[in-house]
Image (spheres, grey):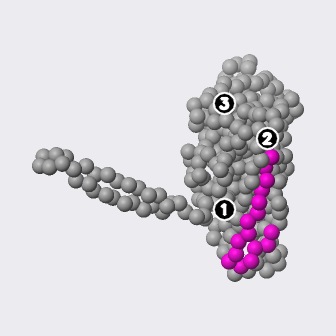
């Protein structure tokens, strides 16, 4: 963000009186917001939901387009380049995004309103239009973005060096909720025939702009649950799959896991696994996988113990038993 500083020095008093200096700082806000550009077929996108942290800038010049969220009176922090909104039940909101085409050719874009989920790499994913599923018995604490928001256009063509603004209407439900709705406005640049390579493949780029909606600034603590265990045998390895659930409507940032696999009969630790910098979307689940290597065939009863903690200071002790059947 560009900054302009005006320093005014005012001398007060006579002789031995102190010199007092008053500084005025004027901040000039950039007209374009921070963008997150991704290759659709290669990776997912992370956008922070903590309003004290700005999203990181990912440069991808081949995309040749940008997306800016238009200001909203409901925005908690106007310096953010994504929506972080504080609203009330029954309120109607009018939002908008502007797509800028910096190329010398017209470009067509598709737009979608996606609910945040957690992929099996432990990363919050904003790119899927399919609603992330929760295991049976677990319900969402909040409505999903697509149920309360509507794009006036889901496909637009932007002229060379031009821009198009797409309105978004949000109608909050009558019933209040605690926690956050987390999703994103997903803008995909559609490929044309000229961008295809020899094999008929082309790079496709998308920009995601996060949307966080709350009805209170009260923090709802996340709730981490070890829901189910499963395994697969691969040669001399045992591949364990632990399904983790964030059962509350709050995100988990910088999740660390310390996993221990213990043989029940002997109390022997047969495997340890550590993972850092994972994250989970509100009301979401993912399958945490790791391999247990052994010089002998693993079978019998085991106990999986997980010590988990996050950036906000929450911690969890999770345990579950697993029976491995012999060949």
- Please name the residue that numbered disc 2 is placed on: 90
Q: Residue furthest left?
A: 15
Among numbered discs 3 and 2, the one appearing first in the sequence: 2
The reply to whether the magenta stretch includes residue 133 is no
Q: Residue furthest front?
A: 13
Circle 2 crowding by C-alpha within 10 Å: few under 14, some 14–19, many from 20: few
- CB within 8 Å, label 3 to label 1: no
- Give SS at disc 3: loop
The reply to whether the magenta stretch includes residue 157 is yes
- Please name the residue that numbered disc 3 is placed on: 221
List x then y, in percent, for residue 197.
Answer: 78, 77
List x then y, in percent, for residue 220.
Answer: 67, 31
List x then y, in percent, for residue 75.
Answer: 64, 48
Q: Quadrant of residue 45?
A: bottom right
Main SS type for the magenta part?
Answer: strand
- Give SS at disc 1: strand
- Please name the residue that numbered disc 1 is placed on: 68
Tell me the quadrant of the picture where the C terminus can be found: top right
Q: Nearer the viewer, mark 1 or mark 2?
A: 2
Q: Nearer the viewer, residue 90 or 127?
A: 90
Query: With respect to residue 244, does 22 lie above or below?
Result: below
Residue 26 is tagged as none
Q: Quadrant of residue 91?
A: top right
Circle 1 crowding by C-alpha within 10 Å: few under 14, some 14–19, many from 20: many
Q: Which residues are magenta?
A: 156-171
At a point 25% along the width and 49% down the height, the residue shown is: 20
């Amino acid at each position: 963000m560009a900054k302009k500083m005006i320093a005014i020095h005012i001398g007060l008093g006579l002789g031995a009186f102190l010199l007092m200096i008053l500084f005025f700082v004027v901040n000039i806000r950039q007209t374009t917001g921070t963008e997150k550009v991704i290759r659709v077929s290669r990776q997912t996108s992370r956008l922070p939901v903590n309003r004290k942290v700005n999203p990181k800038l990912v440069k991808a010049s081949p995309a040749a387009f940008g997306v800016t969220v238009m200001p909203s009176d409901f925005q908690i922090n106007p310096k953010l380049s994504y929506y972080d909104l504080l609203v009330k039940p029954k309120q109607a909101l009018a939002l908008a995004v502007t797509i800028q085409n910096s190329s010398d050719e017209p470009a067509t874009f598709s737009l979608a309103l996606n609910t945040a989920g957690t992929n099996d790499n432990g990363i919050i994913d904003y790119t899927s239009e399919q609603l992330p599923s929760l295991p049976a018995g677990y319900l969402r604490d909040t409505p999903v973005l697509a149920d309360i928001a509507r794009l006036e256009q889901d496909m637009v063509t932007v002229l060379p060096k031009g821009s198009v603004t797409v309105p978004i209407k949000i109608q909050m439900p009558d019933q209040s909720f605690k926690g956050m709705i987390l999703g994103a406005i997903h803008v995909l640049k559609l490929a044309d025939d000229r961008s295809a390579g020899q094999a008929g493949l082309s790079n496709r780029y998308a920009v995601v702009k996060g949307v966080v909606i709350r009805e209170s600034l009260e923090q709802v603590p996340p709730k981490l649950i070890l829901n189910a265990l499963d395994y697969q045998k691969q040669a001399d390895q045992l591949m364990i799959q632990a399904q983790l659930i964030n059962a509350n409507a709050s995100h988990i940032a910088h999740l660390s896991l310390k996993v221990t696999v213990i043989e029940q009969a002997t109390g022997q630790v047969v495997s340890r696994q550590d993972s850092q910098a994972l994250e989970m979307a509100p009301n979401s689940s993912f399958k945490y996988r790791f391999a247990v290597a052994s010089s002998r065939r693993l079978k019998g009863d085991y106990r999986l113990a997980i010590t988990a903690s996050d950036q906000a200071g929450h911690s969890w002790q999770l345990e579950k038993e697993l029976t491995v059947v012999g060949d």
